[in-house]
Image (cartoon, rainbow, N blue to C red):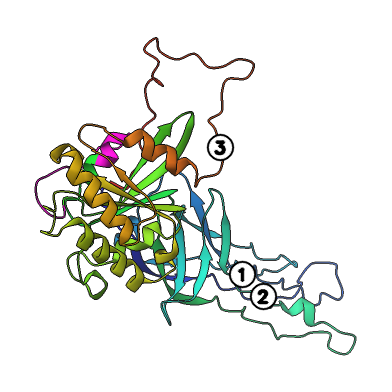
Amino acid sequence: MHFLDQAKIYIKSGGGGPGAVSFRREKYIQYGGPDGGDGGSGGDVVFEAVEGLNTLIDFRYTQHFKAPRGGHGMGKDRTGASAKPLVIEVPVGTQIISDEDRETVLADFTEVGQRVVLLEGGMGGRGNASYKTSTNRAPRQHQPGIPGEEMWVWLRLKLLADVGLVGLPNAGKSTFINAVTNARAKVGDYAFTTLVPKLGVVRHKGREFVLADIPGLIAGAAEGAGIGDRFLGHIERCRVLIHLIDISGTGEGQDPIEALHIVEEELAAYGEDLENKPRLVALNKVDLADEELIAGFAEELKAAGADEVFPISGATGAGLERLMDAILGYLPDKTRTETKGAEREGPEDGSDGEAPEEWSPL
């Protein structure tokens, strides 16, 4: 499945049905009079966040959405049928943004089942029976019904994750997320192995959280260099960021200190308060360096602004438990639901058993 996180669509609510002009023509009734019913209301345009969707790819092939109009009024004072609403399903994390300025957020879906009526259907028109008065016994006027509303909007998907993973290309982010989650990200010895965001679920010490990996940042990403900073929106909602740095400097030919500054500058240039989010600096690929070099770079990173440095190796697993412990301190204290009445039994090897299927945009 292809991943798409932005789409422009046209939406229109249904117009109200016209009222009817009708008169009674029944045998043995001396005075018939008007009996035209009102028109029905048009359908609303409703957006709903649902489970099972994690991309906006469907909106690439269908960009126009029109709700049905209300039914016509009819004789014998029959009101036209009101149209059913048009429900557009979107992934959790979707924002609806005005096309006029590309900034105004009209709706933000953060929970499954959340519904928003974005455009209301038009009211049905009045039939001639509603115009009857003591002095106007045979009215012929009626209303055509109020037209529906229409607009262009942008849909922007921001994946919901607890922890975000940032770093230069080839810093080892894909290897890291494969090591700590149930994701299976592509790993390769070249830049920009990750082309779209990837999600994985971490299970550590009886707790779970979602980790998001985004494509690597390079100098000038805010101006569009490399893949740019378009995927940084997927970590705006994260509680904490992990800044992964390659101790060998092979990713972009930069030493760890310069790599730290490059990514921090791009986060600040992007804005949205990313530069103020808590972050943990992880010095990756320590299996390729000696203790003296690791200690030296750790001290330099602290001098450059890192609060604490975690030497790790995504390939061997060294230092990962300590880093996961630190992440738990930034997350709400939520534990997995256990079987009621007793603690759930696990495999004899002490593992958590088979992990549920991963949630990923790929």
In 3D space, how far apart are the residues under numbered discs 3 and 2 (Cα atoms)? 60 Å
In 3D space, how far apart are the residues under numbered discs 2 and 1 (Cα atoms)? 7 Å
Of badges 3 and 2, nearer the viewer stands 3
Quarter residue 176 falls in:
top left
112 above or below 84? above
Residue 29 is situated, as x and y percent measured from the top left of the image, at: 85, 69
Element type where label 1 sits in the image: loop
* For residue 186, side relative to residue 328 (left or right): left
Answer yes or no: do the residues labelled 1 and 3 have beta carbons within 8 Å? no
In 3D space, how far apart are the residues under numbered discs 1 and 3 (Cα atoms)? 54 Å
Mark 1 or mark 3: whose residue is earlier in sequence: 1
Q: Is residue 154 magenta?
A: no
Residue 298 is situated, as x and y percent measured from the top left of the image, at: 27, 50
Which residue extends farthest right? 134
Answer yes or no: do the residues labelled 2 and 1 have beta carbons within 8 Å? yes
- Characterize the local packing of mark 3: few (<14), some (14-19) or many (20 or more) Cα atoms within 10 angstroms: few
Residue occupying the point 53% across, 66% down: 107
Which residue is denoted by mark 1 in the rendering? 72
Residue occupying the point 83% across, 88% down: 136
68 above or below 163? below
> Label 2 is placed on what type of residue?
Ala
Give the magenta part as a residue range.
Answer: 176-192
Quarter residue 76 falls in:
bottom right
- Characterize the local packing of mark 1: few (<14), some (14-19) or many (20 or more) Cα atoms within 10 angstroms: many
- Count of picture labels: 3
Which residue is denoted by mark 2 in the rendering? 20
Residue 321 is situated, as x and y percent measured from the top left of the image, at: 36, 33
> Label 1 is placed on what type of residue?
His
Residue occupying the point 52% across, 54% down: 110
Q: Point out which mark residue 334 bears.
A: 3
